[in-house]
Image (cartoon, grey):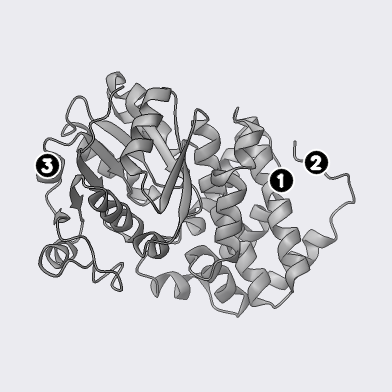
Amino acid sequence: MASPARLRATVVGAGAWGTALADLLAQAGHQVRLWAYEPEVAAAINQQHRNVVFLPEAGLHPALTASPDLAQALAGAELVVLVMPSHVYRAVLGRAAALLPGRALIVSCTKGIEEGTGFTMCEVAADLLPVGFHQRLAALSGPSFAREVVAGAPTAVTVAAQDPAAAQAVQRAFAGPRFRVYTSNDVTGVELGGAVKNPLAIAAGMVAGLNLGHNAMSALITRGLAEMTRLALARGAEPATMAGLAGLGDLVLTCTGALSRNRTVGARLAQGEGIAEITASMRQVAEGVKNTLTVLELAAKVGVEMPIVEGVRQVIYEGRAPLEVLGELMERELKSESYQ
């Protein structure tokens, strides 16, 4: 699949990550439009070159334009980047499906699992889009805080697609001097790594909020990787993906980085705040809150045990004390270390 040097690109979703990706594409010389659900966000981007709601500290490329009109934003797009929150992904893409230009390359950058179906976001897209789009559907994931990407910090991610040519076209479109893109054919592994790391980062935030130390954090990340790997392998993913950018890389970033919304949720839970209070104070979505349930639903379907994610569920949805749950994890039956 040939990819033009410069593309007409549309980014659907003007949260922090969608805005950072739109700015990245504009910096690369593509003609970029950003669809924003909130009219005031679109107006500020067009008038002030700044997303004053979701990424206020970043000045955006002056050629980047935004619109609250989905049809207008998608008209003529050759590259469509989907960055909606996972819980509205189906609804928004359902609206967009009939508006997509027939030869557009579709890139899903949302990290999550759909409630009820257990679908990853690319599986939701395949469920909604005509079969002609399926070979042009890719997933982009990896350790990438929006604030650092838009500031030009060196970043590396992975893009996966069933068709190697589609992955390579996305790779060429996004690659830049500070944004390195690797390709993969393991769409399932790349997407599951991005989804499962969110509830694990909430657990990491609890460890940090309780001041349990570096030993505990290292153990949490390592055993969290084991849970992520078991689920991914049960869904047919490749083991190497879990050791790569979309697996271990994203897990380490989200569990240790102060910019992580999911880690922040966990730290606040550890300090005694309730989940309703925490989520009401956050304008941007912490995907791990909802994905704790959807990850466990998927794990139950494929017969995989995920004790750390289950502990997070108990804290969020049953109001159990984080220290009590972490103590129970330490006292589980002794066994051999296994990632499969």
The spot of residue 294 in percent (x, y) is 52, 46
Q: Which mark is residue 275?
A: none
The spot of residue 66 in percent (x, y) is 15, 55
Q: Which residue has dot 3 on it?
A: 71
Q: Is residue 297 left or right of residue 84?
A: right
Amino acid type, residue under disc 3 in the picture: Ala
Contact check, label 2 and label 1, Cβ < 8 Å: yes
The spot of residue 293 in percent (x, y) is 54, 50
Q: Residues within 10 Å of mark 2 (few under 14, many from 20)?
A: few
Q: Residue at x 39, y 30 (%)?
A: 168
The spot of residue 41 in percent (x, y) is 19, 64
User: Disc 2 and disc 1: Cα gap in Å?
Assistant: 7 Å
Q: Which residue has dot 1 on it?
A: 226
Q: Residues within 10 Å of mark 1 (few under 14, many from 20)?
A: some
Amino acid type, residue under disc 1 in the picture: Ala
Q: Secondary structure at mark 2?
A: loop
Residue 114 shows in the view: no
Q: Which mark is residue 338?
A: 2
Q: Report the front residue among 110 and 182.
A: 182
Quadrant showing the N terminus: top left
Q: Secondary structure at mark 3?
A: helix
Q: Report the front residue among 158 and 305.
A: 158
Residue 206 shows in the view: yes
| First-in-chain label (3 vs 1) | 3
